[in-house]
Structures are given as C-alpha cells and as structure tokens.
Image (tube, rainbow, N blue to C red):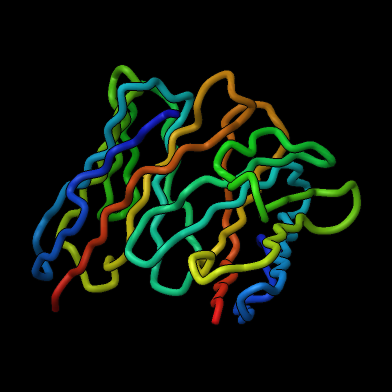
C-alpha cells in the first residue's frame, strides 16, 4: 500500500508564475490536509478537504492560494503569482473517512523555491 | 483555534541522557498524535493516544496523555543520535470533522 505521494519534490518558480503542487492520498483515504512549513518551524495548517469539498480553509491566504480535491485524481494546491515569501516546504497528509480515531499520514513534501 | 504549545522549543543533549518533551493546551482533544520529522522529510507518525491517562511505550520512547486529554508528554530514555529530529504533537479536535492542530515543535539534537 503506497503512502502519501507528493510531486514534485522540488519546484522552482520565478516571481509571478504559478505553482501547482499535487498530492495523492493513501489508498482508501478520503481526507486531505495541506500544511506549510518554514525552516526550523512547525507545521502551519492551510486547508482541509474531503472529496469534492473544502471543509476548512481558515489557514489559507484568501488571495492567490486555492486548493481542490476532485472526485478523481490528486489534490492540488495552487499558488498564483508566486512571491519570494511563498518559498517553503508544503506537506500534504491524508486520513481515512470519519469513524473512530483518525490518524494522518504525511507525504515527503514539495519544497517550493521562488526566485 | 486549538493552540498546542510544545516545550522546550530546542533541546541539545549528550548521547545516553534522558529527556522529556511536553505538549500543552487549554483545549480538550479526542486523540493526540506524536510525529518525528527528519530534515528534508515529511513527519512520520510515532504513536496515537486516545484515553485520558493512557501511557504507550515504543522501545525507549514513552508517551503519556494527560488525564483531562489536554496535554501530553514524550519521554526518551538513553537518547541516541538517531533520535535527532523535530518532534511534533498534533491534537484531533472533537466535533470538527477530524481537524488536526499541530504543536510548535521541539527540535532535538543528540550529540554522540
């Protein structure tokens, strides 16, 4: 059973370009979480999605950032018109459907560098 | 916002020493997870505690969930260089549809 897959692992974008980060959850998992991490810091929650629904996007900037988790295919975190301050590691986690104790499993992250 | 504070933020110890990391909140959690993250990698789940007062052991690591399910501790016995990493606690908030809130992290360095 493959774990959470994120790609690309590393992404370099020039200021003003768009960044698209993909996350394929573990098989059977229908919940996806996106987190952002700066060096030497913990994880900052961005958005929580279930299939075709955004459950909580309270941690995501209202402008330039968007996320989706379609019925088919991976979850996508999209950052438009990137700026240097968007440089960070972005982690995706997935968990199974509601019921009992929920455990989240993480991918290896996408390291975005804006030049 | 369900804030989880971890202490200490940074910890550097000699190989063989014992240490305890704390994760505290004023909020109650349905469950609490501990993760370890190594540089350049994603967090790896170590343990989940669910019941107030619960103690779980994973080799030299002992995890405890507070009686009121608001805090947790991680104790490492005879630390080894391989224990070096960022330790993160995460609480699952009740009635939020499985939302997780992460602590601020404890960066541990074990010196050979």
- In the image, taking residue A114 as reference, residue A50 lies left or right, namely right
Residue shown at 32% from the left, 44% from the top: B57
Please determine whether, in this image, residue A79 is positioned above or below residue B54: below
Say which quadrant the C terminus of chain A sits in.
bottom right
Residue shown at 84% from the left, 41% from the top: A52
Say which quadrant the N terminus of chain A sits in.
bottom right
Please determine whether, in this image, residue A45 is positioned above or below residue A37: above
Please determine whether, in this image, residue A75 is positioned above or below residue B68: below
- Using the rendered view, name the quadrant where residue A8 is placed: bottom right
At which x and y percent is residue A42? 38, 54
- Using the rendered view, name the quadrant where residue B18 is placed: bottom left
Extreme-right residue of the structure: A72
Residue shown at 31% from the left, 54% from the top: B59
- In the image, taking residue A43 as reference, residue B81 lies left or right, namely left
Q: Nearer the viewer, residue B87 or A114?
A: A114
At which x and y percent is residue B73? 25, 39
Residue shown at 59% from the left, 24% from the top: B96
Please determine whether, in this image, residue B82 is positioned above or below residue A59: below
At which x and y percent is residue B51? 41, 23
- In the image, taking residue A18 as reference, residue A42 lies left or right, namely left
Q: Nearer the viewer, residue A40 or B84?
A: A40
- Using the rendered view, name the quadrant where residue B80 is placed: bottom left
Q: Nearer the viewer, residue B34 or A20?
A: A20
How many discs mark residues in the rendered view?
A: 0
């Amino acid at each position: 059973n493959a774990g959470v897959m994120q790609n690309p692992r590393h992404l370099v974008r020039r200021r003003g370009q768009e960044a698209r980060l993909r996350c394929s959850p573990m098989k059977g998992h229908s919940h996806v979480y996106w987190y952002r991490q700066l060096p030497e810091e913990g994880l900052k929650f961005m958005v929580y999605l279930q299939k075709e629904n955004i459950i909580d996007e309270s941690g995501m900037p209202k402008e330039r950032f968007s996320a989706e988790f379609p019925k088919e295919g991976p979850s996508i975190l999209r950052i438009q018109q990137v700026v240097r301050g968007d440089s960070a590691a972005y982690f995706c986690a997935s968990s199974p459907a509601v019921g009992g104790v929920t455990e989240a499993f993480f991918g290896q992250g996408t390291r975005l560098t804006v030049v | 916002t369900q804030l989880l504070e971890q202490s200490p933020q940074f910890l550097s110890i000699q190989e063989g020493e014992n240490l305890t990391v704390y994760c505290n909140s004023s909020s109650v959690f349905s469950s609490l997870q501990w993760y370890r993250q190594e540089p350049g990698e994603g967090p790896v789940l170590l343990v989940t505690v669910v019941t107030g007062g619960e103690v779980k052991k994973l080799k030299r690591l002992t995890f405890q969930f507070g009686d009121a399910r608001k805090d947790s501790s991680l104790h490492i016995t005879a630390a080894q260089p391989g224990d070096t990493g960022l330790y993160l606690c995460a609480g699952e908030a009740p009635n939020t549809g499985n939302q997780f809130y992460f602590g601020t992290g404890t960066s541990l360095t074990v010196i050979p």
